[in-house]
Image (tube, rainbow, N blue to C red):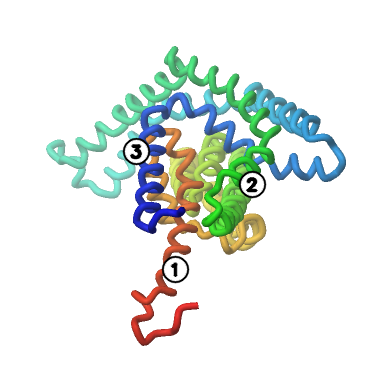
Amino acid sequence: MAGTVGQQARIWGIAALVFLVLLWLLGDILLPFVLGAILAYLLDPLADRLERAGMRRVWAVVIITLTAILALVVAVLLLIPTLIDQATALVAVTPDLVTRISGRLLEWFPELTDESSALRQQIADLGAGLQERAGQLLNTVLTSVVGVLNWLLIIVVVPVVTFYLLLDWDAMVERIDDLLPREHAPTIRALMRESDDRLAAFIRGQGLVCLILGTYYAVALIAVGLNFGLVIGAVAGMLTFIPYVGALVGGVLAIGLALYQFWGDWVWVVAVWAIFQSGQFVEGNFLTPKLVGERVGVHPVWLIFALAAFGALFGFLGVLLAVPVAAVIGVLVRFAIGKYKQSRLYQGTHGTPLP
């Protein structure tokens, strides 16, 4: 016999609490498995399409896995070393960049020549501080033995996890469906279908938008001769996953470097500005409407909050889970609001009769 609403709420609440505690305790261990699950979820439609075309599931998964590994090897051999070199060079040039900017500020605001000025002292300390912190970050990422071992573990484990999860994805979905409480199974299926639709529209669509814009920004900035154009394009492309943030951060960084590199030659500064302006125009009018759609249901403010909150609580694992959790919570909140509007609490005693 099914329990009361209060008993069921307590059971689901305890289950959610246990899940969050396990996530917090096992975050580092779960990272490669969560990455593998995310990749399997993203690649499952492609495997299904190959299967419908007449290919056996195992061969479809093998082809997808080998293609992904080949793409990763090409990226490691061709792109990543260049990105690291440009990022290191950007860190090295930071003090000179800050000094040049501070020189322009002194020209525009002569009162900064006062050595006792707090603002001047802050400007003087900014370059060394940025270089020190950025250098520490690069040193930690690139030379930490533990970090290297962890990433090697991820590189080895993630493809294996992805392969087996992708191979058994449909069977796992069927098993999970069989375990759903019979009374609530139709509602849970409907909520999960809506969550899947919104996640597919956002993650797959927005991921493709990130790839297209990141490639465009990098190629265009390199074409106009901007130093570190590949790094800026990659950063802008990745941050495009958060609506408006990629263009804002990448645009500010690129225009700042353009002012440093092309000072006095304003045509190239305007060209850099035009690259990001055109990228935003294409994204807003063509890419996002076509690839992501209008019914994603993940508001930018809610997405930024979810990334910040889950990142602070669970680290990099939390960042990976922030988007799917935010989308599912959004679906659940809309479902709860719909139920509330059907209740007598909302409609009142003399309101519209309940269906």
Which x, y percent locates residue 214? 59, 43
Q: Residue furthest bottom?
A: 350
Q: Confirm whether residue 184 shows in the render.
A: yes
* Rendered residue at 85%/44% (across/down): 53
Q: Amino acid at mark 3?
A: Ala
Residue, disc 3: 312
Q: Mark 3 or mark 1, which is nearer to you?
A: 1
Real-space Cα separation, disc 2 to disc 3, in angstroms: 27 Å
* Rendered residue at 49%/58% (across/down): 331
Vertical placement of residue 284 versus 86, above or below: below
- N-term mark: 3 or 1: 3
Q: Mark 2 or mark 1, which is nearer to you?
A: 1
Residue, disc 2: 208
Q: Tag 1's secondary structure? A: helix
* Rendered residue at 55%/48% (across/down): 180
Which x, y percent locates residue 78? 66, 25
Which x, y percent locates residue 68? 70, 30
Residue, disc 1: 339
